[in-house]
Amino acid sequence: MKVGRNDPCHCGSGKKYKKCCLSADSAANSEAIAKENIRQAKVHMERQDVLTDALAAGMVPDAMEDSLFEEIEDESLEYQALNDWAREYANTLPEGDSFRNVLLDDGFNHKSLIQLAQKLGHSQYADKAIPLYQAWYKSSDYFG
């Protein structure tokens, strides 16, 4: 429940909220927002580092670069199966493998991951991911 400026303060002092804890709560909220912005910036930079490494290694065609990132929130069983397969396959690859890092990053879209796998010769990943992607595509409201 949100406390209004003229409501009694939640700390129990008996003062109005605006005369008591409003400024401290506002500062704490601003700090929380700043921390979340920093966290999101770090995630973005980590993804860019992975992409830069992949581009430098010739793993990603320049034309795919813009389409790699796509945040999708889908709780369907088909989408979960696709995510589970990406993680399962990633765990078969050695630590530090660039494709492993890309697979474990939830910010990459699956269509681009499949294209990348095919380019890199990860046919075992692509062969299973393609029918999973097609099942998700057919069942999803995401594609309209």
Image: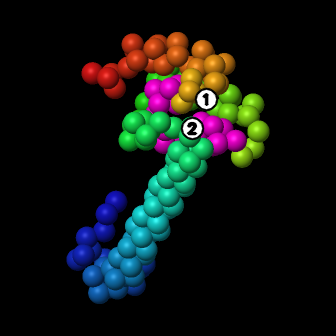
Q: Where is residue 58 in the image (x, y as percent from the top left)?
A: 56, 40
| Residue underneath mark 1 | 120
The local crowd at label 2, few if under 14, some if 14 to 19, many if 20 or more residues have their Cα within 10 Å, is some
Residue projecting furthest to the left: 6
| Residue underneath mark 2 | 59
**Amino acid under disc 1:** Leu
Q: In this view, does 21 lie above or below 143?
A: below
Say which quarter of the image contains residue 85: top right
The reply to whether discs 2 and 1 touch (Cβ–Cβ < 8 Å) is yes
Chain part drawn in magenta: 97-115
Say which quarter of the image contains residue 127: top right
Q: Is residue 23 in the magenta section?
A: no
Task: Work out whether mark 2 precedes mark 1 in sequence or the reverse, and give the earlier one.
Answer: 2
Q: Check the picture and name the quadrant holding the C terminus.
A: top left
For the residues labelled 2 and 1, the Cα–Cα distance comes to: 7 Å
**Amino acid under disc 2:** Met
**Number of dots carrying numbers:** 2
Q: In the image, what residue occupies the spot 45% across and 61% down?
A: 41
What secondary structure is found at the residue carrying circle 2?
loop
Q: In the image, what residue occupies the spot 47% across and 55% down?
A: 44
- Lateral position of residue 69 relative to residue 123, left or right: left
In front: 116, or 103?
A: 116
